[in-house]
Image (spheres, coloured by chain):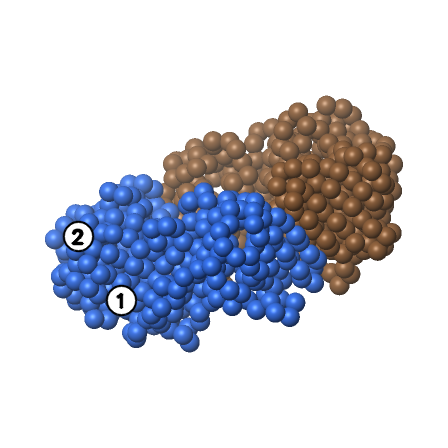
Chain colours: A blue, B brown
Amino acid sequence: MKVICNQSELVNSLGTAFRAVSSKTSFPILECFLLEAKDSNLIITANDMELGIEIRILCRVDNPGRIAVNAKIFYDIIRKLPEDIVFIEVDQDYVIYITCGKAKFKIAGLPGNDFPPLPAYERVNGVKLSQFTLKELISKTIFAVSLNEADQIRTGECFEITGNKLRVIALDGHRAAIRNIEMKEEYNNQTAVIPGKTLLEISKILSGNVEDEVNIFFMKNLVIFEMNHTIVLSRLIEGRFYNLNPMLNSGYTTKVTLNKREFSDCIDRASLLVKESERRPVIIDIKDGVLSVNMKSSLGTMDDELTIFKEGNDITIGLNPKFIMDVLRSIDDEDITLYLTTVGNPCFIRDSENSYIYLILPVNIGNR
Amino acid sequence: MKVICNQSELVNSLGTAFRAVSSKTSFPILECFLLEAKDSNLIITANDMELGIEIRILCRVDNPGRIAVNAKIFYDIIRKLPEDIVFIEVDQDYVIYITCGKAKFKIAGLPGNDFPPLPAYERVNGVKLSQFTLKELISKTIFAVSLNEADQIRTGECFEITGNKLRVIALDGHRAAIRNIEMKEEYNNQTAVIPGKTLLEISKILSGNVEDEVNIFFMKNLVIFEMNHTIVLSRLIEGRFYNLNPMLNSGYTTKVTLNKREFSDCIDRASLLVKESERRPVIIDIKDGVLSVNMKSSLGTMDDELTIFKEGNDITIGLNPKFIMDVLRSIDDEDITLYLTTVGNPCFIRDSENSYIYLILPVNIGNR
């Protein structure tokens, strides 16, 4: 194998592919990139058996071939080369020669055929989104996925497509984050649960530009994201996702509108008194025109008051301040609206169009 | 005690004083700030028994007094308050009330008299430097202090004052970093070894402005830095520092001038192949006009060549690439000059005025 390519292009591609390189594995081949030279392309593949990434860059192929190479060492070497033309050559003993200017590296490779290939897939029923939209959907819901590996289905986000509507749901048993958007086209109805880890990696790869598109293909056990010259494959989480509809359709008896920034600053201050080990709730007391916040812990007490606009009943409720902060960080609006019923029922934070719906289960404050 | 002060001023001062708060101590009082209100000043003191910091801010004192308060909690609370006037009040039970706008905090304090006072000192024979100069002196030598606590004297930097000359020396047994400057005034000759940890903290507090001054007072076991409204005290390291003069006065048989950036890029690349456990040297081979760099490790090999200007003998020497990188990062010049004698003697990197002198002991490459 012999290819000649551009250092900066190669570095960028390796950086992206590196996201799918296994960091903790006893199989040296999973710590590798597969480099494949054919048809004026260098194809870089990484595959940790959950997530796979394939990137194609244009280059001069003097001799086609394939080789696996330790991803970290190869990436580090290419990164530190001058911005110039890079020559990569492999001999029959899988030794890799990397030359750039006067710098010459010689490192050992592994046979390319030992590398586990990415699963094949059909490009049908692709859902088209802007990279900006997908990135936003992920960043504004991902905090609510469960980190508890024993509860597999909640470690993913549910993508629910109904006609031209896409709903994304994350929930961890204490709170839920829901985003609804309308797409330009109609699609077959489908539901898939994508691992949170995959979504985190995807969101780092997405450009965030409104003009750039991403095509998503849902297979039985697999989801594929295609963008630019990059393909990301991930397994799906099997099983049925929770049905939140009954909860979402319940009414409310208190509606409170307040300034997001003021609320966020206040809860942030209250959080100071929360020790990791204690998990104290903030007590939120809602009356006409005033929302009082109280926090009490072994470290001390805090009291604060905010001006609000209220409809309906007075109510006092205990909420986990971290959950409130996570929600407030995910909302761009200047004012937010809380919907409440009783002290034992969830607090909803949503806009009038339901483009976002966040719900937080209350903490029992009966015996304070 | 009751004081009224400005939030942003208080936050800045607490941030600085926090550097002397003990993080790992079984004495709760050492995790505290001492707050002292008197004569229109709030004096904040932190003291981990090695390093002490005292900062004074102007404020309205309605009731003088002193209280100790857990530094982390107090700093966190003040930081999260709105940019406004902060009221701090302490009752006879050492309870501290912090009020800012509608936010009210109540936390427990400790008696101010339990706090260990900073040692007294006399303001005589002060050495005057610009904060910029002291910051530079530290940042360009500190990497060479020893991290080995068993070798106490080398964990500090030697400050040697002779008339109007100041020499700062750091060395760890494998390399040395020396900076020489001329001061505006003449001082009594004196030598002190200041702990590296103190210098690191000082350099973070120094403004880095040429116009700002710092006064340094050397006492028997103590050094004091006075700047703006801040006083930093530190113990000195006792004992005699190493005398490097015999080594510095030896001649050279090879003198090489080369571009610093090219050399640094090349050594950086060679470092890629160094595994933490292996400690491989780079082999530097100097001939007329060409400096070749070779690195060989279990990961692979690297070869590179640089154009140089050489006087004197050819030489091949093995050096620790990390030590070379540390030196190159500390030099602002575009070209650097190496001075060498034999394969067993140190490599010097210095400018013609000796404003900086770095020396690196070679690694034995006899049996490669």
Q: Earlier in the sequence, mark 2 or mark 1?
A: 2
Q: CA distance from mark 2 to mark 1?
A: 19 Å
Residue at 76%, 35% in the rendered image: B59
Residue B288 at x, y percent in the picture: 40, 37
Residue at 60%, 59% in the rendered image: A283
Residue B306 at x, y percent in the picture: 38, 39
Disc 1 on helix, strand or loop? strand
Q: Quadrant of the N terminus of chain B?
A: top right
Give the residue number, with chain letter if any, for mark 1.
A192
The chain containing the residue under callout 1 comes to A
Residue closest to the far top: B184
Q: B247 and B20: which one is in front?
A: B20
Give the residue number, with chain letter if any, for mark 2.
A185
Hey, what amino acid is under mark 2? Answer: Glu
Q: Quadrant of residue B261?
A: top left
Disc 2 on helix, strand or loop? strand
Q: How many marks?
A: 2
Residue B336: which disc?
Answer: none
Q: Quadrant of residue B23?
A: bottom right
The chain containing the residue under callout 2 comes to A
